[in-house]
Image (spheres, rainbow, N blue to C red):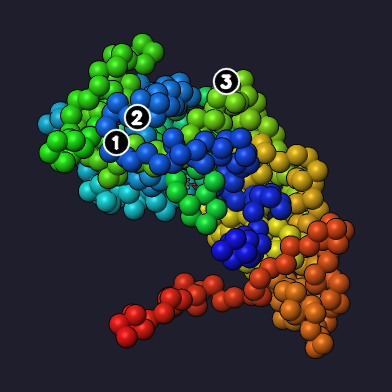
Amino acid sequence: MLRYLKKLESRDLSLTTSMIPLGSCTMKLNSTAEMFPISWPEISKLHPFAPAEQATGYKKICEQLEDWLAEITGFAAISLQPNAGSQGEFAGLLAIREYHASRGEAHRNACLIPTSAHGTNPASAVMAGFKVVSVACLKDGDIDLADLRAKADQHADDLAALMVTYPSTHGVFEPTIREICDIVHAHGGQVFMDGANMNAQCGLCRPGDYGADVCHLNLHKTFCIPHGGGGPGVGPIGVAKHLAPYLPREFILDPTTGKIVFGEGERGKRPPHGNGSAPRHGGGKGGNVAAAPYGSASILTITWMYIQMMGADGLKRASEIAILNANYIAKRLDPYFPVLFKGKHGLVAHECIIDLRQWKSAGIEVEDVAKRLMDYGFHAPTVSWPVAGTMMIEPTESEPKHELDRFCDAMISIHAEMKAIANGKQDRQNNLLKNAPHTARQIGSDKWDRAYSREQAAFPAPWTREHKFWPAVARIDNVYGDRNLFCSCPPGEEFES
Ligand SMILES: *Cc1c(COP(=O)(O)O)cnc(C)c1O
């Protein structure tokens, strides 16, 4: 079993090998110390419906974490229940829906969403029963304020919410964020902040301060829970005082009847956070989004450890370094791959989008660069989102300068390979990029019919000679794979016999 697991692990490129510069997804260090508690039976073996008196330690961990997240986001109440960012969006929108209904405005169902939004935003809005109204973005990536105003006017009677990401999905701190929130409020709507980019804000600014009414966090992005391979996530939401009653409801399993009871439990009675007058915890009348009161409770300890070890100053420092690192990469790569969006002062937030669309004429797609990075031992950045044909790079604060340089060196070296294709020195089809990634089997084969050497293919940078990560498979047809699902387990009939 151990060998089998190790074999699978060795096929996976993780942070133990190199940085994973996946923009928007914040792949930062999951330190071993943060991971310790989930291996303790006190944490990992407790049933979600264990009697409250057997879970007092857990309760304390959850309450402290709620307090810390409330402080970080500037909100009055937190619910730890949602199991993903998208579920947090859903829970937040349900809270907004209930809030409108409580004021006799249940007809408010228009949800403004900028075209740059993450795909989960419109999906959550539809699930929460809203109709999506898209808002245009300007050429520079910012939300088109004129269009926002027009759409808000047009929907003044039925405006429910705006879903907005800050810093924007274009990797820039939009200076108009307060104005954006004001416009929505003036038209009777609520502001849902997509908090996936909280790694640029922790300790520097708070959604609760600049106009958001509810915000989700991705603990599996900003707060160190590992999420490679789609592992479990936590997407808590923070809400302003007026939305606190509509957070997911508190519920327990009644030990005598075995039934789930909803209630204004003890947590709901705790004193308010800061100067608010709402209970600072979930325990509202809103909809539940998970079958366990605290969602994925055990992994909350990872975030608890992170915040505890970092402290307030450490979290602020992390945001600063994350932004600094992104700007360092943006500056180094800009002469080779133009940075698509920058703020007024030529800076980016905690991630940057580089433009590769101009290489299309040479037959080079952004995917070719992504695959070629594997030969250099790197995981590709986010590809073609939020703009097709670009890469979104997010280094995070976890990476030291030499690792940022190693990544930039790889990209610059690939740039030279691209130039060789563009000016005809390399074949347009049979080249280093189109054939990437190269596997050990190909490189070790007796047959080699490529217009470049094996060394160029598999050892293009000095560090690959010191430690080579071998991709397990060569180029696959992504589109074909997405459209044709195969089950790798034996067919049902086999079990029947
Ligand atoms: C990751 C992400 C989400 C969704 O979070 P999940 O945990 O993947 O559901 C939403 N918005 C943005 C901008 C994101 O990056």
Q: Please, what is the three-letter code of the amino acid marked with disc 3?
A: Ala
Q: Can residue 186 be seen in this view?
A: no
Q: Mark 2 points at which residue?
A: 55
Q: Please, what is the three-letter code of the amino acid marked with disc 2?
A: Ala
Q: In this view, does 184 lie above or below 225?
A: above
Q: Mark 1 and mark 2: span between their CA atoms?
A: 7 Å
Q: What label does residue 50 carry, if any?
A: 1
Residue at 63% of width from left, 45% of height from top?
Answer: 394
Residue at 52% of width from left, 49% of height from top?
Answer: 227
The answer to whether residue 101 is left or right of residue 239 is left
- The residue carrying pointer 1 sits among few (fewer than 14), some (14 to 19) or many (20 or more) residues within 10 Å by Cα, namely few
Q: Is residue 454 above or below residue 114?
A: below
Q: Mark 2 and mark 3: span between their CA atoms?
A: 27 Å
Picture coordinates of residue 310, whole percent (x, y) = 60, 26
- The residue carrying pointer 3 sits among few (fewer than 14), some (14 to 19) or many (20 or more) residues within 10 Å by Cα, namely some
Q: In which quarter of the image is residue 59?
A: top left
Q: Mark 3 points at which residue?
A: 312
Q: Can residue 365 be seen in this view?
A: yes
The answer to whether residue 412 is left or right of residue 163 is right
Residue at 61% of width from left, 30% of height from top?
Answer: 319
Q: Quadrant of residue 258?
A: top left
Q: Earlier in the sequence, mark 3 or mark 1?
A: 1
The answer to whether residue 176 is left or right of residue 339 is left
Q: Which of 6 and 473 is in front in this view?
A: 6
Picture coordinates of residue 92, whole percent (x, y) = 31, 37
Dot 1 and dot 2 residues touching (CB under 8 Å): yes
Q: In this view, does 469 lie above or below 331?
A: below
Picture coordinates of residue 414, whole percent (x, y) = 78, 62
Q: Nearer the viewer, residue 49 or 245?
A: 49
Q: Mark 3 and mark 1: span between their CA atoms?
A: 33 Å
